[in-house]
Image (spheres, helix red, strand yellow):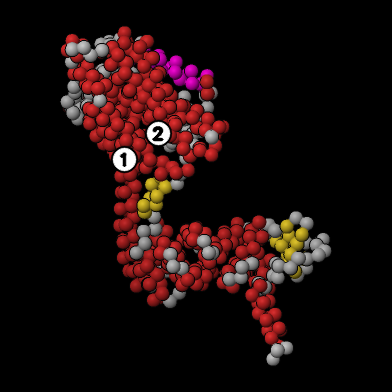
Amino acid sequence: MRKLLPIVLLALAGHAWGLDRAAVGKLAFGESDERSAAIAALVAEGDPRAAEVLSALAAGHMRTAGERVLIAKGESAADAVTGEAVTPVPGDMEEVIANNRLRGEIEGALAALKLFSGERGVRLEAAKALAGGADAGVLPVVKRALGKEKDAEIRALLDLTAASMEVAGGPQQTRLAAIARLGESSSANSRTLLAAALNDADQDIRIAAERSLRAVQGRLAWGERAGLAFAGVSLGSILLLAALGLAITYGLMGVINMAHGELIMIGAYATYVVQNLFKAHLPGAFDWYLLAAVPASFVVAALVGMALERGVIRWLYGRPLETLLATWGISLMLIQAVRTIFGAQNVQVENPAFMSGGIEAFSNVVLPWNRIVIICFAAAVLAAMWLLLTRTRLGLFVRGVTQNRDMAACVGVPTARVDTWAFGLGSGIAGLAGCALSQIGNVGPDLGQGYIVDSFMVVVFGGVGQLAGTVYAALVLGFANKALESVSGAVIAKIAVLVFIIFFIQRRPQGLFAAKGRALEA
């Protein structure tokens, strides 16, 4: 008995560490269907070396030498079945070719093998990969992993994957149970599988699939509505940031500033410069560069705006046509200046790590972190602006000069200085808008041109001189744009919104709220 023990242990060790030689042989020498079956067999076997062999085939490292199957990397080779090194390396090796179909099956097989990893993140990524579509041959592995998995999120994905495989074939009761499980999901893949089952020859299968399909479509519809609502709020927050500065310079001060878009662009380029400085001098703190970019974009744009007010605007108060032409010319000068300094090509501003990725609210809706942060940023800017205008001395002066400039001057308010500070405030907020816009797209000299018309529409629609109206108008136009885009496309949506505003202003020239400000005096 003692003499037999080493032999038994040796046999068990060989079974544990050696792959199925027949399956490996079919993988190298078999026809297309035989190779697919061999992949499923290797995955079902569960040997740790199966992933190495399949990866070698996909990467083009599998070779044959006579009847032997080898894995060759560089100047070395190893037996694919046992993993033992082969010396000397045969000189007559031939490469085993894997076509695209086989590579796709290998990718699913490797994901299935990762389901038994000790790391949750690896198992979760593998489950997501299989949920996107997997070969039916890995069903036994998925079921085995499902029996061992304790994580609720991974279990839900594996259950969906197993159901999607079972609904395609098998006993009727198994298929009906799989259809019922698919009906409880919110995945677009489930909708596709259930739609295919509507053409099944079995009437019971068709009825169950129709019932489950209605349930899935209802949940997906709610997800689409939630995604549309988020897109409307996101666009509204961007329009709000772009229009807040204009609400001061145009709404409160009555200045038609055609260079407002270029002040947004200056804020975006200030963010780009700060980003590069952090890359060059503080690479370890790169994820926090926005903490410096936000005040920098505000200060740079505010200084440019104050210089513009001091040098040009203050001589043109009460002359809207001359102001429009002068600021339009200044906008062209600013664009050319940026092209000279930074070049005509767009520049890339990178998101910090905490603004990358998103939240999967539904299976068909992902809320990007950069959009979420911008919505919160717009709310913070709005709150800060409200506090400044209602709770500070500068805000009191601005409101006094806006409501009655002559009376404010009579009681000692330095109206000229207040004009400069107010214009600088509006310009600085435009710079903050540029900082936010740099996080959702490329930055270029023409960045501001795409927002100047929308900014004026928001201010006019909300009511000139009314900040509350600006907020409501930005959200309404954001929702309207996204709702119409989902039906008719972006171009038609823009035209429809513009036509609506034209008719609205004809009926209600004061906008959503009655106008109060220097524009009335002019």
> For the residue marked with disc 2, what is the amino acid?
Ala
Tell me if mark 1 has few (under 14), some (14-19) or many (20+) residues whose alpha carbon lies within 10 angstroms of its own. many
Mark 2, residue position:
436
Residue 222 on the magenta segment:
no
Question: In the image, 145: left or right of 437?
Answer: right
In front of the other: 35 or 146: 146
SS for tag 2? helix
Find the residue positioned furthest to the top: 315
Magenta span: predominant SS is: helix
Residue 343 location, x and y as percent? 53, 23
Residue under the image location 31 percent in, 36 percent down: 379
Q: Are marks 1 and 2 in contact (CB under 8 Å)?
A: no
Q: Which residues are magenta?
A: 323-340
Quick one: quadrant of the C terminus?
top left
Give the x, y percent position of residue 324: 33, 15
Q: Nearer the viewer, mark 1 or mark 2?
A: 2
Spot occupied by residue 403 in the image (x, y as percentages of width and height)? 18, 18
Quadrant of res 507: top left
Question: From where the camera sits, is residue 321 visible?
Answer: no
Residue name at image x 42 percent, y 47 percent: 358
The answer to whether any part of residue 436 appears in the image is yes
Residue 373 at what x, y percent from top left?
A: 38, 40
